[in-house]
Structure formats: structure tokens, C-alpha cells
Amino acid sequence: MCRLAAVTSKEYENPYSVVCALETMKEGHDGSGMGLLLKFLGGEFEELKQYPALSGIASKNGVEMLDEYMAKQGFKLVHAWSPKIRKVKGVQERDYYFTRFYDYPNWLKDASHDEKIHYLMRTRVELRKLGQKDESLIVFSFYPDVIMLKEVGDPLEVAEFFSLDEGYLKAKIILAQGRQNTNYSINLYACHPFFIEGYSTMTNGENTAFVPIREFLMSRNYPGYIGYDSDSEVFTHILHYMHKILGYPLYYYKDVITPLKPEEADKRDDAQALHLMRYSLRRLCIDGPNCVIGVLPDGYTFMVQDSKKLRPGVVGGYPGRYGLMSEVCGLDRLIPDRDRSKDYYPMRYDMIIVLPNAEGILHWDQKRGSFIEERAAVV
Amino acid sequence: MSTLYLNKPESHELTLKDFPYIINWRDDRCKRCGNCTAVCPMRAIEASVRLERKVVSEGELPEPKVIAKVVSIVKQVDDIERYCNGCATCSLVCPNNAIEPVYNPQHKFLHYINAHGEAYKRGGRRNDPSLSTLDRIKFTRISMLTDPALDAGRHEFRVRTLLGRILPPEELPLKVENGKLVVDRSSGKFIPPVREIFPIIIGSMSVGALSPPMWEGLAMGIAYLNEVEKIPVLMCSGEGGVPPRLLKSRYIKYFILQIASGYFGWDEIIHAIPEMVEDPAAIEIKYGQGAKPGDGGLLPAEKVIDMIAQIRGVPKGVDLASPPTHQTKYSIEEAVAKMIQSMSMAFGFRVPVYPKISGTRTARAVLNNLARNPYAAALYIDGEDGGTGAAYNVSLDKMGHPIASNLRECYLDLVKQGKQNELPLIAAGGVGKTGHLAANAAALIMLGASAVAIGKYIMQAAAGCLGDEYNRCNICNTGKCPRGITTQDPRLWRRLDADRVAERVVEVFKAAETELKKIFAPMGRSTELPIGMSDGISIDDKEMAERLQISYVC
């Protein structure tokens, strides 16, 4: 089972401590890879927040291809950054790990935020296509104030490989996933978290409804709905689809992926909408067992799972710092000084949303179709 | 002329070896009660006599002598029009197991059955007993350790599907108000009616084609399943109207009303609309039937008794042949759209209306037309293994398209257009042919069907229909059904107990639901029907796998 660890904080966090939390959940062989998403960057990147950051891995040829393509599109390189690589047994080094900060092409500068973001996504997709054949160029994200790192290997070793223990990388929101490869071949594009236009999720558990969901998403003809090297990538795209394309509030994500039974939906005051959604979005019902941890472009993070997830994930912490983990031992490692009685173990009807800057927690009760007030009052 | 050759074999006389079934009668067991000859629907056997030469010895010492004795026997006639159809009703009534028909694989039945220039007509389905594509599909994606399998007996399952046009999410008239999604009535957007149903439907079999106890039994079974068992199974009326009392009852919501090219019964239905207390589940417009593509329905005169004539609004005792096509039909773009529109309008746009076609290589053309018609509620494709009450044998055996690939190409076409969730596909034709109802249904669902329909299977399972793919019985067209299923002769249909039929319908669907769960549970699916979950199935033939775009296993 994949391991998931995330932190959202008003202060900058060290990704290594999140990887260490991930490490406590290790139960066996787990060398299929690690993925990291860092959002709201600190340190040397604080000055670069307005520039879109392209994260990926390239061979020597790949870099040339990248430079040529980006120049052609009118992107101007502002800053190139690479993680410090330390030789680690078990992790095979590739030519060039990078996050490159670009200035927008002149013609795009006056475009709206959405247009810019969309163009960044399309550029990422084109770069992915360019490098896919010979794996000379692998790109994970192209978005302002976001860095993604991924590599095959044991998560702790990968963290050491990137020298994360030196503490040179800081971010306010960090998502980390230790991948326990199951059905699909080891491939960096299959490594969570997945990213599209500021939305990112990571998941554990197998997605048995993968093929119909993938077919549905791909048939939306949205340029970013590609890939699907992992059955979990659909969770990110479902989130993007319902929140950005359809414009539904975040808590309806639960109603999309795990809809209520009709007789349960009848009891909610938005029953009519729920029934229509259940029909029209039927193909996006996940059928579990899955725990999903995700982040929105504006910094909301959340955890949700379906009723088949027998051992739920956990969200805990205190205002200013919250952890979202697939297992409680990870949370104990990351935030040992929290009040454990205030931990949330989201069950079949729950969705836990952490506000931006970790200001507090919202507990959405799908059955009632409302936030639980007494819990909301706590935060 | 034959009298000239009294002592010579008649060249045109058939031997019993030419017949599809040969009667095995045992002299030593028969008590000459005459039950078998009385009950035979074909008059294929008759009481006869035979002169027997016997050598006997009656004294204490052997003193053999020859005697001649006339004995009564049961004899199979060699008249092709009175062929034994293998129904085995004789065996059913025989008190001593003295008689049974035996299939003769060397028969030349089709060579001779066209006597008087009449092409052979029959009921049943395609006479092909080989394993169908559906029966070769296996469920191979078993969850175990990567994803725990579910307990079919204890886990919460929802084996339901949707019948009706589904709006694409982008077109839903929803808006956010105070953080909640609400339906935006001001948009004026038409929200098509949708029914949430059990994914196996009882397909169209008409009052008239079926006997009163058979139709009534099915209807009672359906009502019980819905009302008591809470399994929302639907049944289609077939072309031939609906009994008026049912039409005006609240149970009509469990029925799909079919309109076909003869429009039989529709005058009565339209006039009853103001008195109807519930809407029907759906309206099915029949353009084709898998068993006899290109042919209309046919109810022979002998089945058009008083009651049937009243329900259908026709004179009694006349052949009721529906034309091969709707007479109002000019083109799919115009007339089919109009018909869907008219039927929708008749029921205030509250009832899903969908067409039924026979499996055909042109199915995608129909599909694409319907995909663009926002009022089309589904497409029902009836494959070549579908059954019928009466059709030409050549249509049954040689016309039509297998359902598996026809359905799959239609589904993949919808996927390409992103409309796979908008226009449900209903697949039929050979579902449960070998008794694997749930497995065949699940295979079709994973190939892309939203629902499947059964006809022949439910007649066999619920009423003991004797027909099979060795042309056993298959005389539904004659009105002489020995089980009383497809007859209007009270002497025959009194053999059938409507209550028992209803009971069996309930048993069949309850068992099918359990079996569907037993298939879906190990595949990790329980919340939504796994429509189009093609990674879950495989087949043991490479070319079939390629055609169906599923994996090959051996």
C-alpha cells in the first residue's frame, strides 16, 4: 500500500521531516519511488513566486530540446535550480534534475491568470510528449511557487539522494508519497503526487474503477487529461474537473467520487442537485478502497476516503500546523506535540479540509451536507 | 400413383433417419394408456398395430411353433409435417418411462420441411448450440492483496443502472447558492427523465404471443420484485398492448410499453392516458428484432382470440402481421426523431423513450443519430441470438449480428465522443443461452452495456419452455405450445400456473442479483455498476480479444 504524508503550515517546513514521517509508516519492501510536491516555497525561491517553475528530469539531449522549445514559445529563463545530489546506493542518478523558473512570453503577460495557467499546462503536456519516446525529458509540474521532485527508490534513500536532510529546501505545503508499486510498471509518471493547473493529489489503495474513469476523463478532450500511468492519476483530474471545470465547491468532491445512496441524498437540502450529479458523474465514482490527500491552487488541503477504506488516514495538529497522513504513526513523528484527542479519522461520510496557512480545520459531513459546527468552532 | 408401386419402396418416402428426433418407444414398458399420443402437439406419434411373428413352445417338451399376433404399438409417423420436434411431452406424461425422443444429428430436416413451397417458420432462437462469445468471456481481474476483495454476502452492494438520457456534467443546470449546488430553474434546461433500475430487464414479449397465465405470471413476478423485494426489475409489454386494468393501475410503472410497426394496442393505450395513475417506466419503439432482422412481428390467426383482439383493438381470428418497418418512417433524421418526440410528448416528457434495433453492422449509424438527439433515452440492440414467437427459420438462423462485438463497437464509439454516460446501451440476444444469466449480463455490462434484456431465458427458467438450440420444440408460432407458454388455447395454457411462474421469476432475479454480486465482489466493485470495465474481462481467443479490445488469456 502506498504511504502518504502531507503537512500544511504557516511556517516553512523541511520536506525531510515529512519523508521521515513517511518512513515510520514503512512496513516492507517499498522501493518503487518517492514523489514530493512543495508549494508556497521559502528560502531562495521567495523572490521567484511570480515566475512559473518547471520541474522535471532531463538527459543531455533533453535539456537541449527543452531550451529550444521554451525559447520558441517565448519563455525566458529567470533562474535554474537543481537539487544537491548525493550518491546513494539504490538510487540511480540521472543526468539533470531541475526546477527552472521562467518569465512568461510577452504575448501572455497581459492574459488572465486562468489563461496563463492553462498555457503553462499545455506547455508541460507538449514537453512531456516531446520527451516521452526516449525518456530524455520528464516533466512533473509547471506552475508558480511549486516544485516537484520524483525518483525511483526507497523514499528515505531518495530524500538523502536529493540531500533534503541538509534543510536547504523549504515550503509551507508539502505532499510526499512513498510508492508501493502494485499493478503497473515502475515509471516516474506513475509516481504521486499528480499535478494539473495547481491541483494535486496523492492516493493509496487500488482503483478498481480505473478504466471507465480514465475513459470518461480522456473523452472530455481536456489537453491535460493524459497520462494515467497510475490508476491514481484520475483522482487529481477528477478534482480539477469538478472544481475548476464544473465550478463545484471543494466539498462536493466527496459527492462526486463517493456519492450517497439515493435515499441518503434525499435527506439533504441539495438533493435535487445531488441526484443530477450522481447520474451525470456516475463514471467518476471510485469504488475504493482509497484515501486521497490533495491540495488546491489557493492552499486548501484535504483528506477524503471511501467506505471501503477500513483503516482510515488521519489529520491532526494545531492551528498553524497540520499533518495529513495515511497512518497515525506518521503524524506522531511529524507533530508529536499535538492534542491527539483532536485528531480526525475521516470515515465514510467525512471530508477534512485544512484552511490555507493551516488556520484551522473544517469537517464536512456528507450525510448532512454541512460542516460540523462544534468541530468548526474548535478551530 | 403410388398404388402402382405397392410392393416397392416409395422413393419419396422419408426414413425416420431423416427426422430430427427419433422416438425411442419401449414395448416392454408401455401399458398402452394412450397419454403420449394424445398429448403430442405434432401428432408425430400414433397408436398403431403390427403383426408379430413369434416362435413359442407351450408344452413340457420343446415343441416350437410359429404364431402370428397383432399387437398394438406406438409408432412415429414419417410425415415431415408431423415431425417429432423433440419436445418430450410424451415422456412427461408416460407413467412408465416407456417413450422418449432422441436427437438425430444426421437428420435432413431442413431439406424437407419446405413442403408445399412454404418456407419453414418457427419460434425460438438461432439453432446454434456452440458456445457463444458471451460464454467464452471470463472475469479475470480478481482483487486479493493489492485491493481487498469484497464479501458478496455481507458487503453493501448497489446493483442498479440508469435508463434514460443523462445530461453531460457540463450541461447540468446547477449553480452555487450559499455554498450549495442548486438546480437553476431559470435556465429552462430540459432535464430528461431517468429511471434507476435493475440491470436485467425482461424483454418484449406480447400479450398474445404469450398465454394469459404466462404474461400474468411475469407481471406478478415483476410487481413482487419491485414492491416486496425492492429489486426494481422492469418488463417490456411487447407489441400488443397491455390489459386495460393493468394500464390504469399503479403497477404500470414497472412496465415498458412497446410500440412497433403494427401499433397494436396503442389506440387503447393513448385513450387510457387520462386515466393512468402512474407513468410507465419507459416507451420502447421497436424498429427491429435480433431474431428476425428486417421482419415485423407476427401473431398467427389462431392466437387472436377474443381477449387478445380486444386488447389489441383488432378483429379476432385474423393474422396480425406487423410491417417490416414503420410506415411513417422516412429517414432516421426525421421520422425516428419525430416518433421519439411524439411519444415523449404523449407522456409529458416524463417517460424515457428509446428505440430497439436488431444487431447490425449499421448500428453505429443509428447510434450516432441518437447521440445527437437529446430526447433519445437509450439504444437497445438485440443480437442474433435473440428469440421470437414466430419467424422464418432463415431469418432466425442466418440473419443478424452477434451482440458482443456490436455492443462493444457502439460503446467505444460513444467513448470516443465522450457520450458513454449519456446514452445508455441495452444489449440483448442470447443472454443466459446456456443458463449463465448473471455471467452473460456482467460480461455485456463490462463491454459497455448499461442493461441487458432477456426473453427466451425467462421462459425457460420461469415456465419450463422446452425450446433449445437443437430445434427442440420451437413451435411457438403454431399456438400449440405444450407448456402453455405461447398459446391461446385454454386446454394448453391451463397446464401453466401463473403463480408458479411469478414465483420462479422472483427466484430467478434474486439468484441473479446474488450471482452478479459474486462476480463484482472479487473484482472490487460494489458501488457503481462496472459499465465498460473492460480491464476486468478476458477471452480465450486472440482475434476475439482484439475485436472486443479486451485481453487475451489462455
Image (spheres, rainbow, N blue to C red):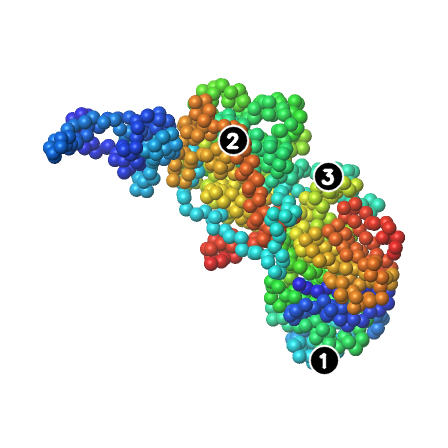
Foreground mark, 1 or 3? Answer: 1
Of mark 2 and mark 3, the one earlier in the sequence is 3
Residue B473 appears in the figure: yes
Mark 1 touches mark 3? (CB < 8 Å): no
Q: Secondary structure at mark 3?
A: loop
In percent of width and height, residue A16 lies at 77, 72
Check residue B189 in the rendering and tell me which mark sits there, or answer none. 3
> Residue at horizontal 21%, vertical 33%?
B11
The CA distance from mark 2 to mark 3 is 47 Å
In percent of width and height, residue B53 lies at 17, 31
Q: Quadrant of residue B192?
A: top right
> Residue at horizontal 86%, vertical 53%?
A376
Chain to which the residue tagged by mark 2 belongs: B
Check residue A86 in the rendering and tell me which mark sits there, or answer none. 1
The amino acid beneath tag 2 is Arg
Residue highlighted by disc 2: B500
Which is nearer the eye, A92 or B50? B50
Q: Residue furthest bottom?
A: A87
Instruction: Check disc 1: other Cα within 10 Å, few if <14, some if 14-19, many if 20+.
Output: some
Residue A51 appears in the figure: no
Mark 2 touches mark 1? (CB < 8 Å): no
Q: Quadrant of residue A329?
A: bottom right
The CA distance from mark 1 to mark 3 is 61 Å
The amino acid beneath tag 1 is Arg
The amino acid beneath tag 3 is Lys
Q: Is residue A183 above or below residue A92?
A: above
Q: Residue furthest front?
A: B60
> Residue at horizontal 65%, vertical 66%?
A180
